[in-house]
Image: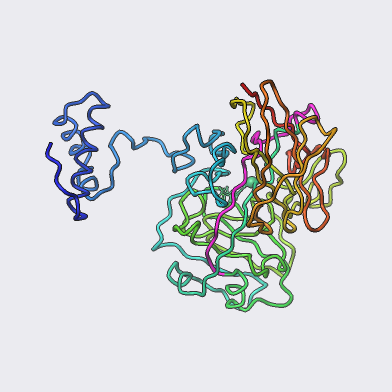
Amino acid sequence: MGREKLLREDDYLAARADEYLWSESNKLGLSRRSFLKLLAAAGSLAPLAGGAMRPASARAATPQPVLKPTPPDLFNDFGSNKEMRWEAMYGRGYLVPNELFFVRNHTRTPTLEVNNWRLKIEGSGVNRTLELTYDDLLAMPAVSFVRYVECAGNGRSFFETGHGKKAQGTQWKLGAIGVAEWTGVPLREILERAGVKKTARDVMPEGLDDLKVRRPMSLDKAMEEDTLVVYAMNGQPLPADHGFPARVLAPGWIGVANIKWVGRIQVSEEPLFTQWNTDTYVLIGPDYKPSAPAKGPILSLQSMKSALELPWDGEITAGRRLLRGRAWSPQGKIDRVEYSLDQGKSWQRARLREPNISKAWVRWDADWDARSGKHLIRVRAADERGNAQPERVAFNEQGYLNNALVDHPITVK
Ligand SMILES: Nc1nc2c(c(=O)[nH]1)N[C@H]1C(S)=C(S)[C@@H](COP(=O)(O)O)O[C@H]1N2
Ligand SMILES: [Mo]
């Protein structure tokens, strides 16, 4: 094949589509001709020539719970939940790229048509019902904040290690968290447009997914400057799996308060209850008392944690290396990170790297002369408000908010 210069967009796309056909047909063991026939039969030649290079064979017959690719080197697979592998963050920057951001779906990612999408604000707590289109939302003043979203169940699997009792739910290690730059409109602005009343108490965003996941927050939380209706993530339109066309961002609060695919926000003068604040996302266990109609204390804030950018129970080669990780708190900047190589007998201070953003995280590192053998690395963080990670956390049946210290196993060869 001659090598022409690909300077024009059209030529470039045509040539790439061509190369792509070749490689796909080779992979399938087909001749180029029969592969073309196959594509034509599937009616997929037109989008292919337009640059949307997706083979007919890649189209799944059954809908997947998560739409983006989640390769095993980046994610632990729990069906509709995909956990970020911490070692994939080693050698990256501050933000988690959209491709690597964890996904937590109660059911599955819906595919929504932006032209039909509306956001409705209604209820006894507003003077008028407001309906916004996507364009209306984009026409409002935008703000951006770097914040984390973390699942209330992050760290859940360590209840089994620490208490010998398995909590119900996805057995996350520490990868159900991500930090992104979120762009959108302050929820406060939207509520004010709807004439939010002084007597309003609860604000409940509702998703357009199968279960219509919804979860109230206090009016105070809804009115914070960084509580947003978000339509962009790390400079990209919000990906389908993360809530396209719009989601709520409720910084520092449990993951489920960050409602994806938001279609309605109910504002009420009465406290609001749903299964997501009476039965789930409440603490149930011997150390917790029910408070009707909730079966236990209702969760709001996440808990402070820290993690290492190392494979879990994996292998690394011996030598001088930078031990690296991140630490985060829902209540302020991280003030201190320490690590122990002897199960907490002695602690060394880690260096903190800029930026250090409240309700996001700080990157930390330390020099480590990794000698061969099996190691357990324990990390603990403290924030500027004087909160420190506890040694132990009381068990709760659904395994929420486990921020007890973790011994990270690693083998040095
Ligand atoms: N509509 C809707 N919103 C939702 C969920 C859901 O299943 N449906 N999952 C919640 C939970 S439990 C978490 S931890 C976060 C995860 O956000 P992510 O998938 O963008 O990482 O979304 C929350 N928002
Ligand atoms: Mo979650």
In the image, residue 170 sits, relative to residue 288, either above or below, namely above
In the rendered view of the protein, which quadrant contains the C terminus? top right
Please name whichever residue, 401 or 122, is drawn nearer the observer in this view of the structure.
401
Please name whichever residue, 56 or 206, is drawn nearer the observer in this view of the structure.
56
Please name whichever residue, 381 or 223, is drawn nearer the observer in this view of the structure.
381
Tally of numbered tags: 0
* 170 in the magenta segment: yes
Kindly give the residue lying farthest to the left in the view shown.
Answer: 2
Q: Is residue 128 left or right of residue 306?
A: left
Please name whichever residue, 21 or 341, is drawn nearer the observer in this view of the structure.
341
Give the percent coordinates (x, y) of residue 137.
48, 70
What sort of colour scheme is used for the picture?
Answer: rainbow
In the rendered view of the protein, which quadrant contains the N terminus? top left
In the image, residue 315 sits, relative to residue 267, either above or below, namely above
Give the percent coordinates (x, y) of residue 144.
55, 65
Q: Is residue 260 left or right of residue 344?
A: left
Q: Is residue 184 left or right of residue 407?
A: left
Q: Quadrant of residue 247?
A: bottom right
Q: Is residue 16 left or right of residue 138?
A: left
Q: Quadrant of residue 19?
A: top left
Bounds of the magenta segment: 160-185
Give the percent coordinates (x, y) of residue 251.
66, 59
Residue shown at 41% from the left, 62% from the top = 116
In the image, residue 273 sits, relative to residue 320, either above or below, namely below
* 275 in the magenta segment: no
